[in-house]
Image (tube, rainbow, N blue to C red):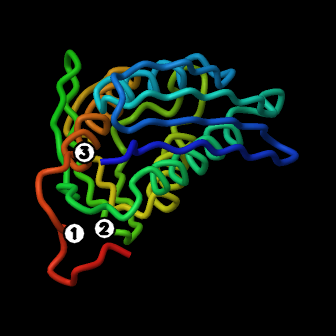
Amino acid sequence: MSQRSAAISRTTKETDIALKINIDGEGRTDIDTGVGFADHMLTLMSFWAGFDLDLKCDGDLEIDSHHTLEDIAIVLGQALLEAMGDKKGINRIGFAKVPMDEALVEVVIDLSGRAYLVYDDDILPPIIAGDEKDVWREFFKSLAFKAGMNLHIKFEYGRNGHHLLEGAFKALGLAFRNALSVERQGVSSTKGSLD
C-alpha cells in the first residue's frame, strides 16, 4: 500500500495554515495553532489515531479563536480526504467510548463520503479554556463536512469541559484508527463506491 498522506496549505485574510498528515504514522506531532488548548486536543487525537501531524496556523487571534479553529478543521478535513485516497480496504466505520475522570464520551464515525454531524453540547460549560463552547461545534462541523464523513459525538455525562472535550478528541482518534484500518480487499460498501 502506498503511503496515505497529504499536505495542504490555505491562506485567507483570517488565517494562514500549513498542514501535513500521514495517517499511517506513529502519532508524532508538531502542532502550533496559537491556541494552546487546541494544540493539546489535536495532539491527543493524533496520538490515539496513530497520525503524524505537522500543523502551523497564524490566525486572527486578536479577534478570537473562531476563525482559527474553523479553518484548521477545514484544512484537516481536506487533508484526511486526500490521504484516504480511494478508501479501498478500509473498515470505514469506527467508534470509541472514552472515560476522562468523571466524564464519558462516545464518538462514532463513518467515512462514507456523506457529511453529517450529530453533536449535542448541552452539558458542556459555556466557556472552556477561555473560549465559547460554540467554537468546538464549528470545528467538528467543518471537519465532518470537509472529510466527507458522518460524525456523531455524544457527551454521555461529565462536569468538566476540559475532560469532556479531551474524551471527545481521544475517542475521535481511536475511531479514526479503527475506521482507517485496512482489513479487506475492496471498498466497504454494497454499492461498490464511497463517493
Disc 2 residue type (three-letter): Ser
Does the residue at mark 2 contact the one at mark 1 (Cβ under 8 Å)? no
Identify the mark nearer the N-term, 1 or 3: 3
Residue beneath disc 3? 107
Distance from Cα at disc 3 to Cα at disc 2? 16 Å
**Foreground residue, 104 or 83?**
83
**Foreground residue, 134 or 194?**
194
Asked if one can make out residue 160 in the rendered structure from this viewpoint, the answer is no
Distance from Cα at disc 2 to Cα at disc 1? 10 Å
Residue beneath disc 1? 187
- Give the left or right position of residue 58, taking residue 145 as reference: right
- Give the left or right position of residue 5, taking residue 184 as reference: right
**Residue 112 numbered tag:** 2
Q: Between tags 1 and 3, which lies in front?
A: 1
Report x, y in % for residue 162: 40, 21
Would you call the spot at circle 3 few (<14 residues within 10 Å), some (14-19), or many (20 or more)?
A: many
Please tell me whether mark 2 sits on a helix, a strand or a loop.
loop
